[in-house]
Amino acid sequence: MNQKMIQAVHIYILFIMSTGFMVHVLIIPAILSTANRDAWLSVIFSTIPFILWILLVFHIYKKLNTHDDILSLLKRKLSQSGVFIIFSIVFGAYFLISAFITLKYTFFWANANYTFEVPNFVSVLLFGLICLYASVKGIRTISTIAFLVFPLVSFFGFLVGFGNSKNKNYELLFPIFENGYIDFLHGLVYSCAGLFEMIFLLFLTSFIKDRLKIKWLILVGIILVFLILGPLVGAISQFGPEEATKLKNPAYEQWKLLEISEHITRLDFLSIFQWLSGAFVRISLSLFIADKLFLSNKRKKWGLPILYLLLIIGASIPWNATSFFYFLQNYFFPFSLTSVA
């Protein structure tokens, strides 16, 4: 098996799984807390700049040589200057921080619901080691696992979405602009902060056998928008805008309401597979790219173990959940938007 090459379809699924985790899990609480009832409008209107962003990213992609990526291009053009080193460090650090936030957020969620009797370090270490194995094996392994779990993750998403239809009151989505337009614009910024991550496909183009198609990239973009819009509308219509803004994991909380019949309830255990699948793909892919950036394509066996050691130690350090979410909303997401844009 050639671990260096994958098909374009793998890239599409990797972005649905990885960026989908960010917009489906990490971004929604921030959008709700800023835009409140108008959060769903912020997501819908973010489609316009997002589609334009996809067109720009695809234009840059077409300028790259076959089996080339943005890192290789910059290395050829700017290897003699400090710009390339700064670029590699900044984006390498971004991917490392992104993996850290995903692992820490996953730990908060798991500890609050399922692993409260398991030592914190054990949970972080075990999941980190699984992700390390995938990153070491390469892009083909990560994309193959994403390809295999994607159908189940999608099915469970439709299950909770349609299964909770009876619990939804769409009148709670109105009136719009009750508090003016400022909150709506703030929500638009957070929505774009997650969606604009699509630019990172430029770091992976050297691994693709065939060529990406603009129509499929736009389809992936639309899917990502719905990955925000679906659970966000569900949270407002089921819990109300005031209660929804208090939830740290609105998408997960909707699982607790799902009932298939009188005798089949509490199906939220299915969300464990959903959550861990997305977190696994996002962490292993992020550190695979970070290793590539920090080492500038040099093959060093110690690169990934060191990155994962930093990740596991960082995620094991105690951090108050409230201050962690404050950091995400006020620092990481704005920095994420400015980095990709």
Image (spheres, helix red, strand yellow):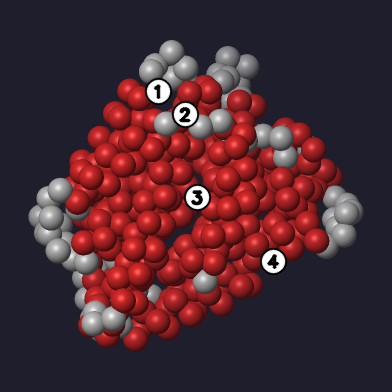
Q: CA distance from mark 3 to mark 1?
A: 23 Å
Q: Which mark is residue 120?
A: 1
Image location of residue 239, percent across then percent down:
74, 34
Q: Kindly identify the residue that appears in the image at 45 percent across and 65 percent down.
A: 198
Task: Give the labeled residue for mark 3.
Answer: 22
Where does the N terminus fall, quadrant-wise?
bottom left
Going from N to C along the chain, the mark reached first, 2 or 4, is 4
Image location of residue 27, percent across then percent down:
58, 49
Q: CA distance from mark 2 to mark 1?
A: 9 Å
Give the crowd class for mark 4: few <14, some 14-19, many >=20 residues within 10 Å.
some
| Disc 3 element | helix
| Kind of residue at badge 3 | Met
Give the crowd class for mark 1: few <14, some 14-19, many >=20 residues within 10 Å.
some
Q: CA distance from mark 4 to mark 3?
A: 19 Å
Going from N to C along the chain, the mark reached first, 4 or 3, is 3
Q: Kindly identify the residue that appears in the image at 27 percent across and 47 percent down.
A: 307
32 left or right of 17?
Answer: right
Image location of residue 119, percent across then percent down:
38, 18
Task: Give the labeled residue for mark 4.
Answer: 45
> Closer to us: mark 2 or mark 1?
2
Going from N to C along the chain, the mark reached first, 4 or 1, is 4
Q: Which mark is residue 318?
A: 2
> Closer to us: mark 3 or mark 1?
1
Viewer-nearest residue: 335 or 282: 335
